[in-house]
């Protein structure tokens, strides 16, 4: 954390990510991200595993939240704004708040590998 802001990472996947049911994937659980002892990111999606790498972004990105703010403060308003306020309309302005900074990304560009369970017990019979 720097300057009181959270630091996030961006994730980049090469190829398409589709659900089996062809439903929207927005706000859905996709998988788990883990890191090896060496710092290599691992993404597990269902029965597949992807190995990636951490890259620095050329330019940092800001994650911002847009909010509408109502105000009856007349300081700094021009004549047209004051006229609309006199008509009984509240003044609205837009504020952007920076929530986090993104300086790194997790890049997964290799094909997923299937996760195969150990079959030692099955081979002993």
Image (spheres, grey):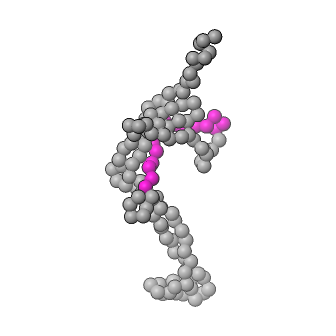
Q: Residue at x 46, y 86 (%)?
A: 75
- Percent position (x, y) of residue 20? 63, 34
Instruction: Answer yes or no: is residue 29 visible.
Output: yes
Residue at the (39%, 64%) spot, across then down: 3
Position of 48 with respect to 100 (left or right) is: right
Q: Nearer the viewer, residue 56 or 74?
A: 56
Q: Quadrant of residue 123?
A: top right
Camera-nearest residue between 6 and 94: 6
| Residue 99 placement (x, y as % from top left) | 47, 62
96 in relation to 112, above or below: below
Viewer-proximal residue, 59 or 82? Answer: 59
Extreme residue toward the top, this view: 125
Q: Residue at x 41, y 37 (%)?
A: 37
Instruction: Indicate the position of residue 117 as horizontal and vertical percent values.
Output: 57, 24
Which residue is located at x 53 percent, y 26 percent? 114
Magenta residue span:
7-22
The answer to whether residue 3 is above or below residue 20 is below
Q: Quadrant of the N terminus?
A: bottom left
Task: Answer yes or no: is residue 14 visible.
Answer: no
- Residue 110 is drawn in which quadrant? top left
């Amino acid at each position: 954390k720097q300057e009181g802001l959270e630091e996030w990472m961006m994730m980049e996947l090469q190829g398409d990510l589709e659900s089996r049911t062809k439903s929207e994937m927005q706000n859905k659980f996709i998988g788990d991200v883990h890191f090896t002892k060496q710092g290599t990111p691992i993404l597990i999606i269902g029965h597949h595993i992807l190995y990636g790498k951490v890259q620095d972004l050329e330019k940092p990105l800001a994650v911002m939240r847009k909010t509408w703010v109502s105000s009856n403060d007349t300081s700094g308003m021009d004549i047209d704004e004051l006229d609309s306020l006199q008509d009984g309309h509240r003044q609205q302005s837009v504020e952007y708040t920076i929530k986090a900074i993104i300086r790194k990304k997790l890049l997964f560009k290799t094909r997923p590998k299937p996760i195969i369970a150990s079959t030692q017990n099955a081979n002993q019979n």
